Image: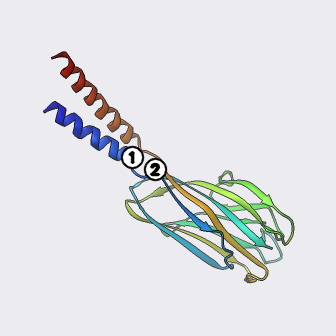
Amino acid sequence: MLKQLAGAFSFIAITSFMTPVAMAYDFDGTALSSPDSVDYSFNAAATAATVSFDLFGYNTLDGFPDNNYEDYFTLSVNGSAVFSASFNLGGDGGAITVTQGDSSYVSNYVYNGFNNGGSLTITLPVTLVLGSNNLTFSYASAIPQGLGDEGWGVKNLSVTTVPEPESYGLLMAGLGLVGFAARRKASK
């Protein structure tokens, strides 16, 4: 009985600990006009996670403030905006202006000069719900200018789940029971 119980705990611990740790989807970085959006849907356990992706600006994607031509990027998780900012990725205006979230989420900022685009990496914590989750990447423009003037794209998207402390506890309990059962069997 103890051996079966230990096996069951180990199976539960290992399967709960090994829920998908990382999901990756590589958007191809195709230039989208502003305003526009792109969605990524996936299933997950209810848990904390980290979302990371590269954001590209093509031609003259403008930052804030810039003569009313500024463009605003927003990341929404399950319909709720979690990060919003304006970036100068080839146009005019400020380099990085974060309006929702934390500027520390932004790294690897590259400005290639006027009309030559740019890129950056965004990495931020999010909370996933049990079942279907949706990430929406969107750009809005004060004055839409079209792909002839500016565009944006997403590449290298990854969603990495953070194991809950209970998962580690359950794993340790299962492994402890397996060890106890093996030791008990060896002493007989």
Residue under label 1: 18
x and y percent of residue 38 in the render? 57, 73
x and y percent of residue 44 in the render? 41, 58
Q: Amino acid at mark 1?
A: Met
Residue under label 2: 21
How many labels, in total?
Answer: 2
Give the vertical position of 77 relative to 3 (above or below).
below
In whole angstroms, how far apart are the C-alphas of marks 1 and 2? Answer: 7 Å
The chosen color scheme is rainbow
Residue lying furthest right in this view?
114
Residue 105 horizontal side relative to residue 22, left or right: right
Q: Amino acid at mark 2?
A: Val
Residue at 70% x, 72% y: name it: 152
Could you say which quadrant of the image residue 45 lies in? bottom left
Label at residue 80: none
Residue at 26% x, 30% y: name it: 178
